[in-house]
Amino acid sequence: MRKNLNKLATLALSGMMVMSMAMPAFAFDSKELTIPFTKKLYVDGETLAPQTAFDFTIEAGPGSTEWEYETATGTSKVTTKAGLAGGVKVKKKAVFEPQPGSAEKFGKKEANSDYRYFASDAEFEVVDSVFAPATVDYGTYEYILKEVNSGYEGVVYSKSEYKIMVMKYHAVDPVDNVDKDHIIAKVVRTKLGNTINLTEEQKKKALSEKVTGITNNYGNPTPPPNPDIPPVTPPGDEDHPNDSTHVVTIKKKVTGNASNKSQDFEFEVFVVPASVTAVTDSKREMYAVLDEDGATALSGKAITASTQAEYAVRTAAYKFTFKAKDGKGIKITGLTKGDKVYVKEVNGAGYVMTAGEDKTNYATTGDLTTGTRLDELAAVTNYETSFNVHKNQAAVEIKNDKDNVTPTGIVMNVAPYALMLAVAGGLGVVFVNRKKEEE
């Protein structure tokens, strides 16, 4: 009996040991180890969210930095220690994805302003196993945080620099009254990416306050002044430096004395990006489609980017179709300069089709860098045109012209009869004159 009890005790102890090995033991509260970090992306109010994820790098810093921080009673200063290898890691990227059917498809409205933005939470994690050992001294450890410039077309990445300060200390927990180790982790900005339009007080505050996120720009021509992105940073041009996402209006015009202005002309549209750098794996960029005046969104309507090969065989999944009468059309939003737009008219037979834009070099055809203005006087072949949009609010007009055949043929048809009448008249005059002579 005693042997059996001993065996059971041994088995129970072994089981507890196995369980303890299988279940990680944390020296610190899990909430203390988590560092939430929000990515904020300003947009122009007509562009869908980008199809990308923003990543970060975290490296151990050299230490010996004088860091002043706020406490419950005022401020305190510490000299940082060199970061421990692998002590902080990126647990989750900030992921963005277009939602064309959402009520906030063009972003949330910022409080007390007209700015719109998208936001997504990244997450960093202090590694428990690195800081838990008793051999790790109490103090503040320094890490260098950088945003990865992934090269997603149209995004202006932050030029600020950051550090993560990880403080290990020992205190009585006020909740369970247990004397134990704790972790406090804060992100601080150490260099401003922008000083334009910021007051000295704003600059000072930006370098001393705890940072809970980072700001980027995606097509807003005039983003609000902030420490991360200058309001005059490329991409773009000297007129609209931050205007990296564009809207194009495509309208139908019907002319000619034999045209039918009430006819619905059907169009097929493809968008082929020149670059898919930093686009989320197995995902596609999307472009919102609005009606011709931009007031009413076509609910859930969007064009999904295709590849050149998919366009060549006109893959149905990436083909957007619409119909338009004379003076009507659509808007496509969120286009960057590398996005090639293909527009084909399906039922224009019998018309002469031309396509052109109304602003010099807002939309160009041909090669992205060496292409020429989309000339409204140039006829197109196979009822199809293509262009890149380089500036916002481009306007492309697709014109169909049809005239009747000139009436010259009708005149020639009556000419023989006129000739016969003339001959008959002449003969009549001769006959009358001869009759007078005989009398």
Image: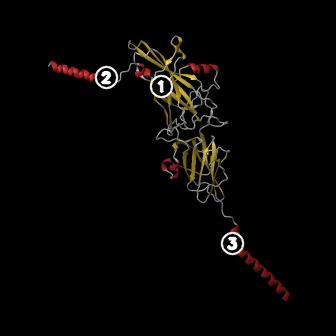
Quarter that holds the C terminus:
bottom right
> Residue sitting at 30 percent across and 24 percent down?
19
Give the residue pinned by disc 2.
Answer: 20
Which mark lies nearer to you, 2 or 3? Answer: 2
Q: What is the crowding at mark 1: few (fewer than 14 residues within 10 Å), some, or many (at least 20)?
A: some
**Residue 383: image location, x then y, percent:** 59, 55
> Residue sitting at 43 percent across and 13 percent down?
170
Q: Earlier in the sequence, mark 2 or mark 3?
A: 2
- SS of the residue under disc 1: strand
- What amino acid type should be assigned to the residue bearing mark 1? Pro
- The CA distance from mark 3 to mark 1 is 87 Å
Which mark lies nearer to you, 3 or 1? Answer: 1
Q: Are marks 3 and 1 in contact (CB under 8 Å)?
A: no
- What amino acid type should be assigned to the residue bearing mark 2? Ser
Q: Quadrant of residue 195?
A: top right
Can residue 233 be seen here? The reply is: yes
Q: Between 349 and 171, which is closer to the camera in this rendering?
A: 171
- SS of the residue under disc 3: helix
Q: Are marks 2 and 3 in contact (CB under 8 Å)?
A: no
- What amino acid type should be assigned to the residue bearing mark 3? Asn
Give the residue pinned by disc 3.
Answer: 413
- The CA distance from mark 2 to mark 3 is 106 Å
Q: What is the crowding at mark 3: few (fewer than 14 residues within 10 Å), some, or many (at least 20)?
A: few
- The CA distance from mark 2 to mark 1 is 29 Å
**Residue 324: image location, x then y, percent:** 58, 50
Can residue 439 be seen here? The reply is: no
The numbered dot on residue 294 is none
Give the residue pinned by disc 1.
Answer: 36
> Residue sitting at 60 percent across and 60 percent down?
350
- SS of the residue under disc 2: helix
Quarter that holds the N terminus:
top left
